[in-house]
């Protein structure tokens, strides 16, 4: 049997406080995410378990990925909350108390985790405007997809430009490469319904092998 690491009384007390939060609000996500993040970061589970995965499974019957979702959701909400007071358009104009409008469940935050922190703020602001504060996870997904589509478009244009500027590349090849990029972009925008993303990656890899 492996020996568990010793923890200080302060660490043990903090673990009890954080676990009490999880027990009280296991179906929530903000306070739970905060508690899980601190336990993982400081390895407060090490007094009873050698592994984070075992701790999650034994204590909370949670998979590591689900726990990560909770932690990521908390990080998104904290990011939005910290920036809120610096952006008046984030305020709920229908509320005299100017209460903060934050995601109310993990489903609303999950799409935002695909964006960098700065874009999470901009995307959330756009969601608030579109829904007039009545946010839905579907609307968050739509807005995030628009942000990602713009990013892919810019990246595709940059790739095309780099190919066209490359010395020794024929016009025929540049045109063919641009067509391939356009086709892949269309399939991505369609949600990879008719062409799997792995096949698209394999196609690009084949082109790279051919060039080599």
Image: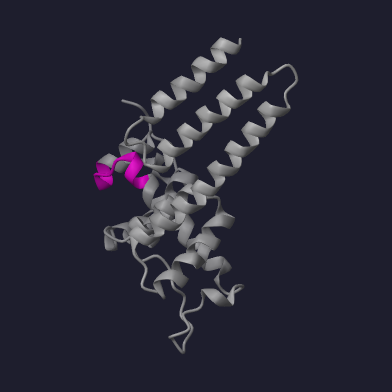
Residue at 62% across, 20% down: 172
| Viewport quadrant of the C terminus | top right
The quadrant in which residue 210 appears is top right
When asked about the image quadrant of residue 157, the answer is: top right
Residue closest to the eye, 42 or 97: 97
Residue 22 at least partly seen: yes
Residue ID at (50%, 60%):
123
* Dominant secondary structure, magenta: helix
As drawn, 86 above or below 198? below
Horizontal and vertical percent position of residue 163: 66, 26
Residue 9 visible in the displayed image: no
Residue 60 x, y percent position in the rendering: 26, 47
Magenta range is: 58-67
Asked which colour scheme the image uses, the reply is: one colour
Pick the front one: 111 or 148? 148
Comparing 46 with 185, the one in front is: 185
Instruction: Pinpoint residue 174: horizontal percent, then vertical percent.
Output: 63, 24
Q: Residue at x 63, y 32 (%)?
A: 160
Q: Residue furthest right?
A: 167
Q: Is residue 151 above or below residue 19?
A: above
- Up the image or down, 193 lies above or below 9; here it is above
Q: Is residue 64 left or right of residue 121?
A: left
Give the quarter of the image for residue 138: bottom left
Of 121 and 41, the residue lying toward us: 121
Whether the magenta-drawn stretch holds residue 148 is answered as no
Which quadrant is the N terminus positioned in? top left
Residue visible at 32% across and 45% down in the picture:
66
């Amino acid at each position: 049997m492996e020996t568990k690491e010793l923890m200080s009384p302060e660490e043990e007390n903090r673990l009890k406080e954080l676990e009490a939060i999880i027990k009280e609000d296991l179906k929530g996500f903000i306070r739970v995410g905060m508690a899980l993040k601190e336990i993982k970061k400081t390895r407060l589970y090490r007094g009873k378990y050698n592994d984070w995965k075992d701790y999650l499974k034994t204590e909370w019957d949670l998979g590591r990925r689900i726990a990560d979702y909770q932690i990521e959701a908390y990080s998104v909400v904290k990011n939005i909350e910290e920036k809120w007071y610096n952006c008046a358009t984030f305020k709920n104009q229908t509320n005299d108390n100017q209460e903060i409008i934050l995601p109310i469940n993990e489903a609303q935050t999950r799409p935002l985790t695909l964006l960098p922190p700065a874009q999470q703020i901009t995307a959330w602001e756009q969601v608030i405007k579109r829904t007039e504060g009545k946010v839905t996870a579907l609307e968050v997904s739509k807005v995030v997809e628009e942000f990602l589509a713009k990013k892919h478009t810019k990246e595709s244009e940059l790739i095309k430009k780099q190919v066209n500027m490359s010395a020794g590349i024929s016009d025929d090849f540049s045109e063919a490469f641009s067509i391939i990029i356009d086709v892949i972009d269309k399939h991505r925008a369609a949600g990879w319904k008719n062409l799997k993303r792995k096949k698209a990656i394999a196609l690009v890899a084949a082109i790279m092998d051919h060039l080599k």
